[in-house]
């Protein structure tokens, strides 16, 4: 389950919850089956509630910091949001982060050309939403889980799915940027959003990207993050992708 983290949506959700639980005009409940809760038995445990911060959505950018803060108060303190899915577009490499057109920074995946990346969109989302959300979580004695979600709904002459070492370089450049500017790094990497909507991102490609990224991050002093995959649009589609991922040595 996901709730958007932006103020109008969270506010509407909070109001809806209040109406559902305290509407004075509700008719008296009719007699029906009784549900008995056995608190000694547990079947599933919810470890996190994630809100999506999408690079494609900009309705929140016109809000003031105070308005965003009020929305985050509801999201973190009232709704209990404990994770944020931070989107990063493939076009952050080469085209300014506002599109999916990838322009390789250079021909060597082991040498990062910082000028070949534009983190402007990512910085706006982090500074205006993620940082204050982390502060509110820390005030509660909690730690906000940041899931860096790679999004590539376009085609380019150069594609990361065909170049796992370049995908790994992209993630390393992003981790270094976030750590250097904000003092933290993502807890997890959602390898590719909706691969079944993106030509080329097979289970094999996802697995190879995971292995290359883990090795490159670790070689540069970062702890290996959690990897989230396959992130398909529908659960039945996941089977084939998982088979492809598990066929990759190390994945």
Image (tube, grey):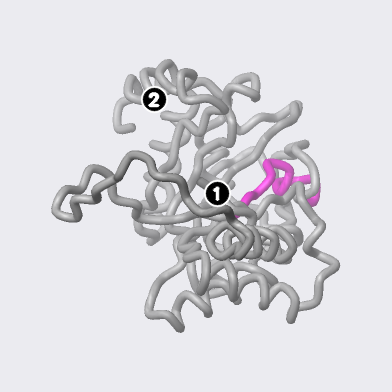
**Which residue corresponds to mark 2?**
245
- 220 left or right, relative to 120: left
Q: Nearer the viewer, residue 20 or 105?
A: 20
Q: Quadrant of residue 126?
A: bottom right
Label 2 packing within 10 angstroms: few (<14), some (14-19), many (20+): many
The percent position of residue 203, horizontal first and vertical second, equals: 46, 22
At mark 1, the secondary structure is loop
Q: Nearer the viewer, residue 63 or 8?
A: 8
Q: Give the residues drawn in magenta, as a range.
A: 85-96
> Is residue 25 depicted above or below 31 in this figure?
below
The percent position of residue 87, horizontal first and vertical second, equals: 63, 50
- 180 left or right, relative to 215: right
The percent position of residue 125, horizontal first and vertical second, equals: 69, 63
Q: Nearer the viewer, residue 72 or 98?
A: 72
At mark 2, the secondary structure is helix
**Which residue corresponds to mark 1?**
2
Q: Residue at x 57, y 46 (%)?
A: 149
């Amino acid at each position: 389950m996901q709730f958007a983290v932006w103020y109008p949506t969270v506010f509407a959700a909070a109001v809806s919850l209040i109406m559902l639980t305290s509407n004075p005009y509700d008719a008296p409940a009719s007699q029906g089956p009784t549900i008995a809760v056995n608190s000694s038995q547990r079947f599933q445990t919810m470890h996190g509630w994630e809100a999506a911060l999408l690079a494609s959505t900009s309705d929140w950018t016109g809000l003031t910091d105070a308005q965003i803060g009020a929305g985050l108060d509801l999201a973190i303190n009232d709704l209990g949001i404990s994770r944020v899915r931070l989107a990063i577009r493939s076009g952050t490499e080469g085209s300014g982060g506002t599109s999916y057109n990838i322009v390789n920074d250079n021909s060597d995946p082991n040498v990062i050309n910082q000028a070949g990346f534009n983190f402007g969109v990512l910085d706006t989302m982090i500074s205006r939403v993620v940082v204050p959300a982390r502060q509110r979580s820390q005030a509660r004695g909690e730690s906000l889980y940041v899931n860096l979600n790679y999004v590539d709904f376009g085609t380019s002459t150069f594609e990361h799915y065909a170049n796992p070492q370049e995908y790994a370089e992209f993630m390393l450049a992003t981790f270094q940027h976030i750590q250097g500017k904000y003092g933290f790094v993502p807890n997890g990497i959602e390898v590719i959003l909706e691969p079944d909507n993106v030509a080329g991102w097979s289970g094999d490609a996802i697995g190879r990207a995971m292995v290359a990224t883990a090795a490159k991050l670790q070689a540069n002093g970062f702890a290996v993050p959690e990897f989230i995959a396959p992130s398909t649009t529908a659960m039945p589609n996941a089977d084939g992708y998982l088979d492809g991922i598990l066929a990759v040595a190390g994945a």
